[in-house]
């Protein structure tokens, strides 16, 4: 029987980061991954034609580059091959009539673009950027700490000391605000509101969902202040470096190794059983980086706490995503040529379009006009495609996992196998409103429906790329469920980590690193 101090179920970036920290503290760690390679939703594959390397899901590595984990382990990660591709022209939105607005790291350039829509908004943008360092410190003091009462008390004391009562209350109000509420209070231009509001859709925050204002704010200000980073050669540069570090410090990453169930004795996790029948012992911890619904299989007799088990069963996932990966001869011929330099271009012309798409998807309907995120990684990193060629990373947000109808009344089929390619045509047609001729440039495409995404990674339930809604009732102290925000479960030594747990989705390695520090005592 194999023995480890800590067993990780899954080998996504949170598991790998946690394993690195524990291994550096002398723990013997083993990671067991169902897929044929580590990385979870962070994978880079030749999905279309040879030589075209596509990021399967996650593309933007800015959260990881700015993470507490990278601040500690960055030099060693770099020695193990991690390389970033910095982005100066970060994101933009396109509008009818050839108009557009985008955020680049040069403040004067961004301000000048905003000024074409509103002089007042250009001044507001400059004021927000100037105040960002102080406000970011307050927000990140919450997002970057364990969600436990003692930690919250310490954070609240610090907030009161730094911001005073009125400042603390205002921050609390902001954290509870919807994107539209904050954007309407802050800007007058509908286009500037749409530019920022599109980021809420990445994290299940349609314009009118409470608690979503912080994400458009942070993305806008962070990209303006620091820029963005992609992974050089692909997002998997991060995964390769993490896996190499685990193994360099005596750990093991085993793929094609599905964990069938967790072993318990006297209410304590003692190991796991793999699908091939092997039993692996865990002396100190079993850490599952899985979607909560997987616990029913891992703990077939339950956790011993019926309330916890019911809450886990009731965990809510966000609507799905459809990915369209394109190998193309040229970047889109946008109505403004400058848009070819941007990492992301959002086809989301108004907050109302976003809200409508979200409601249609929640009702089980294929949206008439989904939010389309056009990723242009080869504009920044040409190494991902053959010389002179490009890849496009298209994300349709949001779509239903179970199709009940088509809001446009055009598609009759209800099965994603039949709908997949037809709906991808709709997505490309939306882009061609602003970049005519895209279809003629396509060499090959790979369309992945919400169900395709889930088949490739069980954590992407129904194509939910953020592993669970971040709405207020399932965030902060309530992520994944009340009483388990500290990555704990009723089974001693059995922990949850990953995007379904605090601090949520993204590639910041927050849950894996914070849990590992908690287990290792720092």
Image (cartoon, rainbow, N blue to C red):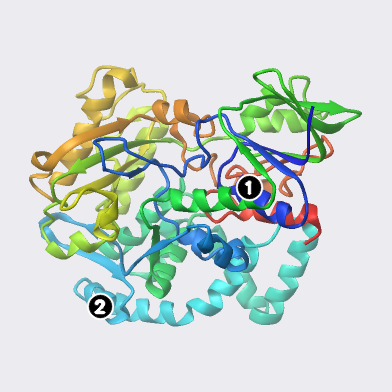
Q: Nearer the viewer, residue 349 or 346?
A: 346
> Which label sits on residue 109?
2
What is the x, y in percent for residue 468?
55, 39
Q: Residue at x 8, y 47 (%)?
A: 436
Against 191, residue 437 (above or below) is: above
| Percent of width and height locating residue 349 | 24, 53
- The secondary element bearing badge 2 is classed as helix
Q: Is residue 407 left or right of residue 83?
A: left
The quadrant in which residue 103 appears is bottom left
User: Where is residue 451 shown, x and y percent of the image?
Assistant: 41, 26
Q: Which residue is mark 1?
A: 247
Q: In x, y percent, where is residue 48?
A: 26, 35
71 relative position to 208: left or right:
right
The correct choice, above or below, for 314 with respect to 357 in the image is above
Residue visible at 51% across and 42% down in the picture = 39
Front in this rendered view, residue 180 or 198: 198
Element at label 1: helix
Q: Is residue 65 visible?
A: yes
Local crowd at mark 1 within 10 Å, few (<14), some, or many (≥20)?
some
Front: mark 1 or 2:
1
Residue 497: mark in rendering: none
Q: Dot 2: within a 10 Å radius of its alpha carbon, few (fewer than 14), some, or many (20 or more) residues?
A: few
Is 432 placed left or right of 396 in the picture? left
């Amino acid at each position: 029987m194999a023995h480890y101090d800590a067993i990780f179920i899954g080998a996504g970036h949170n598991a790998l980061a946690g394993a690195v920290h524990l291994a550096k503290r002398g723990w013997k760690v083993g990671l067991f991954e169902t897929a044929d390679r580590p990385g979870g939703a962070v994978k880079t594959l030749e999905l279309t034609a040879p030589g075209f390397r596509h990021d399967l899901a996650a593309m933007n590595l800015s959260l990881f580059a700015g993470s507490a984990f990278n601040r500690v382990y960055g030099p060693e990660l770099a020695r193990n091959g991690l390389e970033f591709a910095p982005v100066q022209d970060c994101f933009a939105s396109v509008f009818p009539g050839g108009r557009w607005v985008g955020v680049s790291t040069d403040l004067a350039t961004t301000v000048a673009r905003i000024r074409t829509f509103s002089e007042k908004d250009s001044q507001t943008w400059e004021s927000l950027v100037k105040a960002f360092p102080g406000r970011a410190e307050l927000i990140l003091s919450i997002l970057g700490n364990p969600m436990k009462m003692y930690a919250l008390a310490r954070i609240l004391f610090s907030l009161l000391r730094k911001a005073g009562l009125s400042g603390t209350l205002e921050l609390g109000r902001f954290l509870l605000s919807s994107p539209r509420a904050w954007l309407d209070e802050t800007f007058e231009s509908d286009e500037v509101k749409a530019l920022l509001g599109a980021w809420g859709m990445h994290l299940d925050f349609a314009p009118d969902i409470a608690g979503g204002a912080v994400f458009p704010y942070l993305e806008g200000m962070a990209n303006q202040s620091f820029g963005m980073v992609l992974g050089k050669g692909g997002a998997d540069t991060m995964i390769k470096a993490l896996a190499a570090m685990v193994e360099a410090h005596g750990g093991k990453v085993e793929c094609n190794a599905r964990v069938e169930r967790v072993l318990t004795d006297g209410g304590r996790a003692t190991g796991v059983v793999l699908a091939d029948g092997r039993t692996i012992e865990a002396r100190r911890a079993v850490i599952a980086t899985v979607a909560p619904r997987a616990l029913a299989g891992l703990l077939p007799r339950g956790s011993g706490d019926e309330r916890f088990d019911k809450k886990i069963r009731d965990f809510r996932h966000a609507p799905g995503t459809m990915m369209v990966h394109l190998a193309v001869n040229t970047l889109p011929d946008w109505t403004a040529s400058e848009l070819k330099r941007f990492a992301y271009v959002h086809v989301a012309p108004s907050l109302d379009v976003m809200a409508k798409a979200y409601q249609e998807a929640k009702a089980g309907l294929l949206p008439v006009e989904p939010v389309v995120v056009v990723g242009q990684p080869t504009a920044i990193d040409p190494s991902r495609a053959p010389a002179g060629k490009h890849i496009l990373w298209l994300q349709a947000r949001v779509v239903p996992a179970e199709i009940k109808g088509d809001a446009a009344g055009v598609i009759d089929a209800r099965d994603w196998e039949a709908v997949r390619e037809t709906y991808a045509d709709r997505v490309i047609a939306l882009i061609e409103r602003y970049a005519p001729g895209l279809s003629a440039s396509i060499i090959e495409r790979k369309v992945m429906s919400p169900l395709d995404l889930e088949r490739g990674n069980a954590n992407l339930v129904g194509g939910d790329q953020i592993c669970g809604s971040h709405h207020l009732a399932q965030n902060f102290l309530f992520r994944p469920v009340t009483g388990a925000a500290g990555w704990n479960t009723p089974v001693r030594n059995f922990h949850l980590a990953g995007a379904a747990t605090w601090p949520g989705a993204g590639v910041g390695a927050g849950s894996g690193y914070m849990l590992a520090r908690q287990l290792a005592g720092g």
